[in-house]
Amino acid sequence: MIVDVLIKLALAGAFLGMVLNLAGLLTWVERKQSAVMQDRIGANRADIFGFRMLGLFHGFADGIKMMTKEDFVPPFALRPWHSLAPVLSLTFSLVCLAALPYGGEFHFHGRAWTLQPLPLPGGIVFVMAMLSLGVHGVVMAGFASGNNYALLGGLRGAAQMISYEGAMLTALAAPLFVYGTLDLNEAVKWQGGTLFGFLPAWGIFVQPLACLLFLTAGAAETKRAPFDLPEGEAEIVGYFIEYSGMKFAMFMMNDFIETIVLAGLTTTLFLGGWQVPGLHGAGIGAAVVGLVAFIVKMSVVIWLLMQIRWTLPRFRFDQLLDLGWKNLLPLSILNFLVTAWFIYLKGPA
């Protein structure tokens, strides 16, 4: 019993460290990917003993800078809530990652193990609930700063997140209805079949419109360009304008964590998760291959989101809300109705 607890704690620690390092790595990916698209060199100045490692050390420099900068709290701010806001935002995003199935079950030391840190029968409900709670950190940051501009940024962020949460949930209704489960691991197993005898039964082929709608709404939920109106640094006063040091870094890291969550959900529900066509088995080898497949698929989605970030111009706020309420939501409802009627008319398999 004690050994099992220690193993789970070690896995949880390794998982948390991996995610936080991945979020830090994404700062380098963003810089270099944008540089390639804009025909620039990108980050390349930070070095250790003359070694620059393609700019990888800029992430370490950012960490040192954030940890050593003064944690300034305005005298007119509500200090307890000002400190709690970034913690709430980052915590809820990190908890979402614990419910994702990173690999299938495997047998080791006489028992079955799973690469899903938090197995839940209603995993998708848990993830979406945690994501929706993240809006509290945004509003709290704007309100507790005692700055009217920060408050407007918080309200802008809350309106955006609530608008696109509805579109995200409605877009997921159709594929989840097809899978017949709210368990993320079971949804991945459903996608292990084939369509027409040769095409993987991944959600992107079964529900292509739902995949597109979910990705669009998810990109807006992460508050990244072209949906970065709550925090556009260049010309818009964001909700964390009164933050500095590690609190500012937590808000920035939260955006990358939310991007990872979105990529993980897309991989799980639309790209077959850890499924590899033609690969079967419950051994450690199959589990490792499935884990690698999940990471590769998730990386492709993150790359796509980065491409969108550096390709499309920012929306006006009225355009952003119109897109969510008048386009994505109606299309998601229509897609669900068509899916439900198709399954009903088709009858039991």
Image (tube, rainbow, N blue to C red):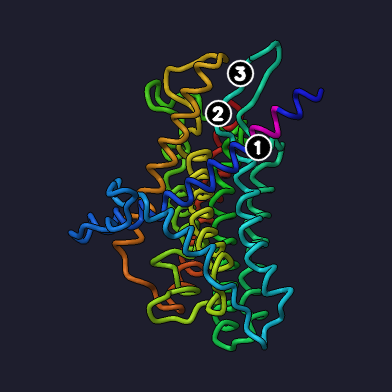
Decide which of 64, 1 is in the foreground and name it.
64
Give the label, 1 or 3, closer to the camera: 1
Q: How packed is label 3: few (under 14 Cα within 10 Å), some, or many (20 or more)?
A: some
Q: Residue under circle 1?
A: 12
Q: Residue furthest top?
A: 110
Badge 2 or badge 1: first in the primary sequence? 1
Q: Which residues are magenta?
A: 7-12
Q: Residue furthest left?
A: 39
Labelled pair 1, 3 in contact (Cβ < 8 Å): no
Spatial distance from mark 1 to mark 3, Cα to Cα? 18 Å
Q: How packed is label 2: few (under 14 Cα within 10 Å), some, or many (20 or more)?
A: many
Spatial distance from mark 2 to mark 3, Cα to Cα? 9 Å
Q: How packed is label 1: few (under 14 Cα within 10 Å), some, or many (20 or more)?
A: some
Q: Decide whether residue 187 is among the magenta residues.
A: no
User: Which residue does the image show at 60% across and 54% down from the upper left?
Assistant: 93
Residue 65 as seen in the image, left or right of residue 28: right
User: Which residue does the image show at 50% across and 74% down from the upper left?
Assistant: 230
Decide which of 238, 228 is in the foreground and name it.
238
Picture layout, residue 142 above or below residue 278? below
Badge 1 or badge 3: first in the primary sequence? 1
Residue 295 as seen in the image, left or right of residue 71: left
User: Which residue does the image show at 64% across and 42% down from the upper left?
Assistant: 98
Instruction: Identify the element where label 1 is drawn.
Output: helix
The amino acid pointed to by label 3 is: Phe
> In the image, residue 12 lies at what x, y percent?
65, 37
The amino acid pointed to by label 2 is: Gly
Q: Which numbered circle lies on residue 106?
A: 3
Q: Which numbered circle lies on residue 103?
A: 2
Q: Quarter holding the C terminus?
A: top right
The amino acid pointed to by label 1 is: Ala
Q: Decide whether residue 10 is among the magenta residues.
A: yes
Picture layout, residue 278 above or below residue 255? above
